[in-house]
């Protein structure tokens, strides 16, 4: 069994942002040389997510509206009594998830129709990373 690990770095200009990282994950799989296996892609921070969905601009705007309804960024949170202001970002990360696992078949990401991998940033404007770990043969 082979294994290959890579870290992707992000520093978003907005505090909340969604970035399609499918190409970067595909490149990591290619570099690994693995033809049959799985790739794990996970956010290394508790205020960011990795998730899979459609790359459709309306839907990406819909996440922002939907998340803001569930978790008001300006709401009252006990976590913010510690001097932080990012309780909403921890909660949004929990809703959107930490990681994804994708099958690799014949050296390619084996997706369902329209599936794309996204990095979801909820407390951006600073350097953060995502781990990509490819295992297989
Ligand atoms: Zn915090």
Image: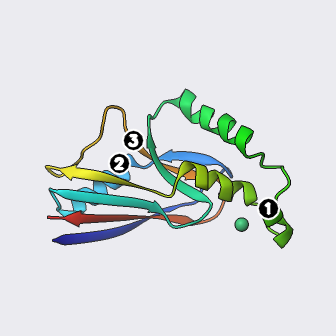
**Is residue 20 at all visible to an observer of this figure?**
yes
Residue 89 horizontal/vertical position (percent): 68, 56
Q: Are the residues tagged 2 and 1 within 8 Å (C-beta)? A: no
Camera-nearest label, 2 or 3: 3
Camera-nearest label, 2 or 1: 1
Tell me the number on the disc at residue 34. none
Dot 2 surroundings within 10 Å: few (below 14), some, or many (20 or more)? few
Q: Mark 3 points at which residue?
A: 116
* Secondary structure category for the residue under label 3: strand
Q: Please tell me whether residue 48 is drawn above or below residue 108 in the rendered image.
A: below
Label 1, label 3: how far apart the Cα atoms are: 30 Å
* Secondary structure category for the residue under label 1: loop
| Residue at the image position 44 percent from the left and 39 percent from the top | 53
| Residue at the image position 36 percent from the left and 32 percent from the top | 114
Q: Mark 1 points at which residue?
A: 85
**Assess mark 1: CB under 8 A from ligand 1?**
no
* Secondary structure category for the residue under label 2: helix
Marks 1 and 3, the one that precedes in the sequence: 1
Dot 1 surroundings within 10 Å: few (below 14), some, or many (20 or more)? some
Q: Please tell me whether residue 68 is drawn above or below residue 114 in the rendered image.
A: below
Tell me the number on the disc at residue 23. 2
Q: Which residue lies furthest to the top in this view?
A: 58
Residue 101 horizontal/vertical position (percent): 35, 55
């Amino acid at each position: 069994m082979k294994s290959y690990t890579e870290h992707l770095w992000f520093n978003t200009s907005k505090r909340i942002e969604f970035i399609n990282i499918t190409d970067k994950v595909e490149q990591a799989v290619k570099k690994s040389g693995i033809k049959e296996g799985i790739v794990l892609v996970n956010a290394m921070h508790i205020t960011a997510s990795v998730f899979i969905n459609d790359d459709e601009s309306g839907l990406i705007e819909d996440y922002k509206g939907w998340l803001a309804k569930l978790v008001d960024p300006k709401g009252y949170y006990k976590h913010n009594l510690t001097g932080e202001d990012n309780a909403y970002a921890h909660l949004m990360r929990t809703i959107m998830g930490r990681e994804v696992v994708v099958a690799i078949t014949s050296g390619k990401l084996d997706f369902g129709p329209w599936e794309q991998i996204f990095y979801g940033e909820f407390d951006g404007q600073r350097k953060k990373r995502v781990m990509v770990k490819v295992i297989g043969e």
